[in-house]
Image: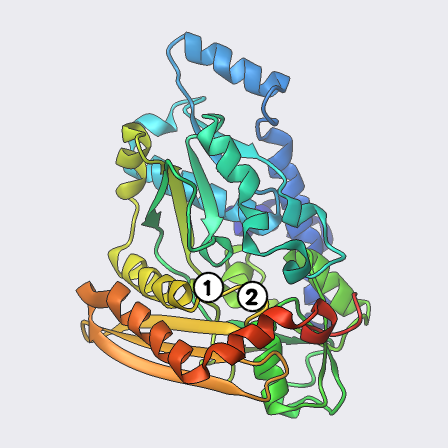
Amino acid sequence: DWAKKARSLFVLPLFGRPAVSEKMKFNTAISALLVGYCAAFAPGPAGSKARETLLYMADGGIEPFRIGTRGSPLALAQAYETRRRLQAEFPELNEDGALEICVMKTQGDMILDKSLMELGGKGLFTKELDTALLANEVDICVHSMKDVPTWLPEGTILPCNLPREDTNDAFIYKDGSVKSIEELPDHSVIGTASLRRQSQLMAKNPTLKCVNFRGNVQTRLRKLDDGVVDATLLAIAGLKRMDMDDCATAVLDWDEMLPAVAQGAIGIQCRSDDERSLKYITALSDPDTKACVDCERAFLEALDGNCKTPIAGQARIVDGRIQFRGLIAMPDGSLKYETESEGAVEDATEIGRKAGEKLKAEAGENFFEMMVEMSPQQVIGQLTK
């Protein structure tokens, strides 16, 4: 909402509405402008004067509730959504100084010229937040759930998932002329850091070339617009949260591209003994989202998934029952194993675990050993863009 209001109040009156062909550039620029505007008014990092001022206010009766987040435009959008929901649920959090957003950089944000598997995996986007949480520098951490490892540091829990956004992937072609994966010309270059996406793309067309493509949403769209690659894929959830979903050429259904485990879900983590934080965030949790995410993460944990293994898994609740679909594959799409299952919602975790164990048995130990032995260059495209 804040993005739409800012666009209508400040941007469109000055610049007018963009032509359809300029939507991608316009949305990218405006998103960056809005995040910069918000960051200008957000408290600084630990130890800064802005933070010291807020803590001084706390001595006068205000104890700020501190929300830890990464600093990307998408992460900030998710942190502001969390703040909005907290303020709507708890009137006391609407007082001046009652909430503080603490922005921090993770190693995964700072090193963009290497693939995630070369750097060591998903924990790269959460380690600094975990450290701040355990050091009592923040009260909660807001995460994109697909970035969160299946294990959590001792002393922390993740009891809250906000209502989930659309979980599907968005397909974005450089000029919008190609509307689907099947229409891609042979030898097209696709920008993606995801082995899950790479394997499913190459299963459809082995001539496609996938290259490492990292950075925030705005950076990736700018590279696409500059002709670095022909197409890319992004989670439609992130685009929607930043009011940028009109950049998508098409939204892919599960048959075209099965999404990542926990894609589209926001998770909120706190210290396990922090009753104040638990009171606030458990009130925000959506039971259906939590059940589906728990199912998917149990599937991932059973597979002992790492960044060398293309894994996809999605659950949804239909007519009061949970339906799960999972996939593991070779990075080049030459071999894949799939499973589907269904059951009672209260059995969500067990359904996910059994699905993971089933695929692990079908693939055999050699399948996973082969993944571990493969070098990064063998696993993902040779070029780094």
Residue on which the image places disc 2:
245
Left or right, 376 with respect to 131, comes to right
Residue on which the image places disc 1:
263
Residue drawn at point x = 69 percent, y = 73 percent: 380
Left or right, 67 with respect to 384, comes to left
Residue 247, quarter of the rendered image:
bottom right
Q: Are marks 2 and 1 in contact (CB under 8 Å)?
A: no
Q: How is the image coloured?
A: rainbow
- SS at mark 1? loop
Figure check: 342 above or below 65: below
Q: Classify mark 1: residues with Cα within 10 Å, few (<14), some (14-19) or many (20+).
A: many
Q: Position of residue 194 (x, y in %)?
A: 61, 69
Residue drawn at point x = 35 percent, y = 42 percent: 157
Query: Reading the chain from its start, which is encountered first: label 2 or label 1?
Result: 2
Tell me the kind of residue under disc 2: Asp
Query: Which mark, by number, is residue 189?
Result: none
Tell me the kind of residue under disc 1: Gln
- Res 1 visible: no
Q: Position of residue 314 (x, y in %)?
A: 39, 72
- Res 302 visible: yes
Q: Position of residue 76 (x, y in %)?
A: 55, 44
